[in-house]
Amino acid sequence: MLRARVGGGRAIIRMDRVIIVGAGPAGLTAGMLLAENDIPALILEAEASVSDDLRASTFHPPTLDMLKPYGLTEKLIAQGLISPTWQIRMHATGEKALFDLSLIANSTGHPYRLQCEQGKFCRLIVDKFADDDRLEIQFGTTVTDVSQKDEFVELAIERGERQTVEMLTAPYVIGADGAGSIVRESLGLEFEGSTYPETTVLASTTFPFHDYIDGLSNVSYCWSEGGNFALLRLRDFRASTYFVATTFRLMGTPPISRVLESSNRSCVSTRSTSKKPATFR
Ligand SMILES: Cc1cc2nc3c(=O)[nH]c(=O)nc-3n(C[C@H](O)[C@H](O)[C@H](O)COP(=O)(O)OP(=O)(O)OC[C@H]3O[C@@H](n4cnc5c(N)ncnc54)[C@H](O)[C@@H]3O)c2cc1C
């Protein structure tokens, strides 16, 4: 790291590392791959720590294969729920298409989906490099502007609650700052695609759906007349707050409210105990 002065008296810190903006799954994976190839990297993350928000929860066979050389797959499996099948089912009739991943066992070392929250994956990478100088992570650091210069990239950052502004330069910057990327915006890059018009409701509950719906997989995409929902089983999402360790994650469009009505609304809470419903339709 070198320092230089520029007009206006503000220090510019010149970094020799690749700077990655964002410590989500993309930024942390990029940082890990660079570091493992002895290319030092610095991740700048706006939040104070890795997010534990319940977001993506499935690792597919190729991902588990790809992560194995980095020692992450076994650690993920230890924290996750192995799910050899997944299904698409009609909620009203129970008809289903069952996908049995054991059938691709000759093509992958991991013929199953692994239910494991993305926050756990992120934390594994943070821990892996805690004492490894090749990957540095600075939390509480928000990138506010990025500009391409002739021979380097310049970044404006704000640190912590005092929001002191600093300037950094780096030979390369990777934008991994998610859907509202400031890197993309600063560089005037297009973001192609469109947003789904539906709103998705996501809830977690300790309610044991598998005891009430025959033949449910750990990952079940359920279709019903008025819309769809997914029942995604997790191993122990914030288990210490539960009396029942089994946790389901619900995602869906409005019909989910009817599912919850019939299962018992009081179960839809990250801290409630499970109660047996009178019926489940
Ligand atoms: C409620 C919810 C449910 C989801 N469910 C699923 C699912 O079931 N399956 C699935 O595949 N995907 C799911 N996703 C999507 C999945 O979470 C994202 O695809 C994934 O997080 C993208 O990873 P990322 O690293 O690109 O971005 P992010 O995870 O968004 O990480 C970006 C990081 O950059 C940081 N950051 C942003 N701006 C700045 C800045 N200016 N300076 C510094 N840091 C910054 C953010 O704090 C964040 O930590 C879900 C998302 C949400 C919100």
Image (spheres, helix red, strand yellow):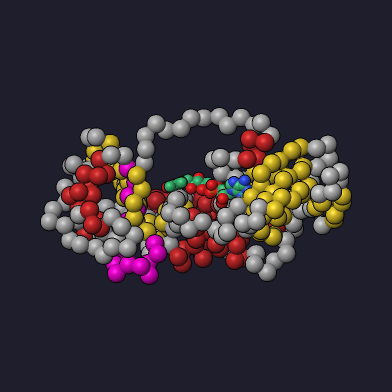
- As rendered, which of 24 and 210 lies closer to the eye? 24
Which residue appears farthest toward the left when viewing the image?
Answer: 278
Assess whether residue 193 is covered by the magenta stretch.
no
Q: Is residue 202 left or right of residue 39?
A: left
Which residue is depicted at the point 70% across and 66% down?
A: 132
> How many circles with numbers are drawn on the protein?
0
Q: Which residues are magenta?
A: 237-252
Does residue 140 appear in this view? no
The picture places residue 81, in percent across and down from the top left corner, at 39, 61
- As rendered, which of 5 and 231 lies closer to the eye? 5
Q: As displayed, is residue 236 above or below residue 56?
A: below
Quadrant in the rendering for residue 210: bottom left
The picture places residue 168, in percent across and down from the top left corner, at 76, 49
The picture places residue 136, in percent across and down from the top left corner, at 69, 60
Which residue is depicted at the point 28% across and 63% down?
A: 272
The picture places residue 165, in percent across and down from the top left corner, at 71, 50
